[in-house]
Amino acid sequence: MGRRIAAAAVGWVVLACLGAPGARAETLELVPDEQAGWSLRNVFAFLRPGHFYGPRRLEVETTPPGATLDVFYIRSGFQKRYEQATAPVTLILPKRIQASSRDSVSVRATADGFRQQTVRVPVSSSQDRLLIELAPLPNTLRAVAHTYFSGRASLGFLLDESPTIRVQQKDRGFSVILAETARAPELGEALQGIGSPLVAGVDAQQLGEDLLVEVDWGPAAANGGSVELRSRQHHDHVRDLYRFSIDLVPADRGAAAVEQARRALGRIAPSDVTGCAAVFDAALRDALDPAALARALRPAGSFTDPYLRAALRRLGEVAPGGRIRLADGSSYRPEVPLELAAAASQAALAEGYLALLRRFVEELEPARHRAETLRSLIAPELAPRRFADALAAAEAAEQRCRGGGAHAALR
């Protein structure tokens, strides 16, 4: 984490040295209506006329540039003036002879993704330039992974450090407040298109040093009255990321959905994983990141684990030879628990598995949610738009295999 903060800080220093293209310093007058009272130094001010009677300016800059500045003129502990500006800014202050030794300017700088910082400068001092270097926030939200299947959903928040989180429910959804957390630049694209019967949309907004994630209920959530929120957290040691997950559990704990899923698996036939369906399977696997696919399909304590394991067993039942075959040439018998567990640990390599999951989704979900449901199962961290491109390419390969026949189940 220290290396991430150091790299970000160096980058902003470089930008500050180069200067923002076209940036011009704003000028603000910060002179109180009344002068300070007479003091003994007025007697000796003639000894330094340039210092006491010359114009008083303070140039304020920030790293990174463009921070929001709250500027306060303080006299004897009382606020006399307040202005707000965007860095860089030039402050016009009263001449030193018109200010007391207790007059000061307090500058509070804030920028999205950085810690707030306040600096005080005495008006009587010789300081005429102020550079405020903002430190990056200690945590960053890298991605939001949405998973939905068979009436249940989960939202996973991937962060650099163990988060401090507060969850607040509301009528139309719930809010997740991540303390001292910035949002990664690519997060906006990843949130666009997230949706399911339980989640209508997700939006993230930076509020000073905290990040607010707003989740809106989908049509199946019934204003949240029939959904229970459960949270869990674990550390992804491979990527050195922390994952905070919120499970959305229906009131009936999904009992009816489990029975529907069992019947749906029974309707999957060999033709759903062989022939042109196998072409689709291979094309989609090639379009996805192998490591991300392996993470999504490997058992990890998610509510989808039992469904994925049952689907893998069904793959072995309908595949040629009654075995689960992997891309590396190995194969496993689905009826042997130990071999099924071995296959589950390498499910991303199982030939026909992605095609079977597509058919599984078709059996359970309405047409408008099928693509997003499949994405949430096999590529939950991939931006919906990018997954849509990969899915379209795989479907096109399948259509060519069928001689131009249409297969639009996920459209």
Image (tube, rainbow, N blue to C red):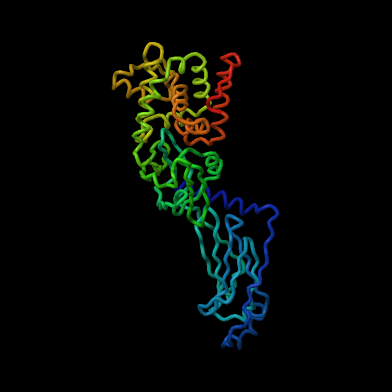
User: How many numbered marks have been drawn onto this rendered protein structure?
Assistant: 0
Residue 64 in which image quadrant: bottom right
279 versus 100 height, above or below: above
Identify which residue, 117 or 185, lies in the foreground: 185
Q: Looking at the image, which residue is at 59% across and 80% down?
A: 99
Identify which residue, 402 or 136, lies in the foreground: 402
Residue 197: image location, x then y, percent:
47, 38
Residue 29 in which image quadrant: bottom right
Residue 94 in which image quadrant: bottom right
Q: Looking at the image, which residue is at 51% across and 56% down?
A: 207
For residue 33, side relative to residue 284 (left or right) = right
For residue 399, side relative to residue 321 (left or right) = right
291 versus 55 height, above or below: above
Identify which residue, 271 or 251, lies in the foreground: 251
107 versus 407 height, above or below: below
Q: Looking at the image, which residue is at 62% across and 61% down?
A: 86
Residue 300: image location, x then y, percent:
36, 34
Q: Residue furthest right?
A: 22
Q: Residue furthest top?
A: 321
Residue 264: image location, x then y, percent:
40, 24
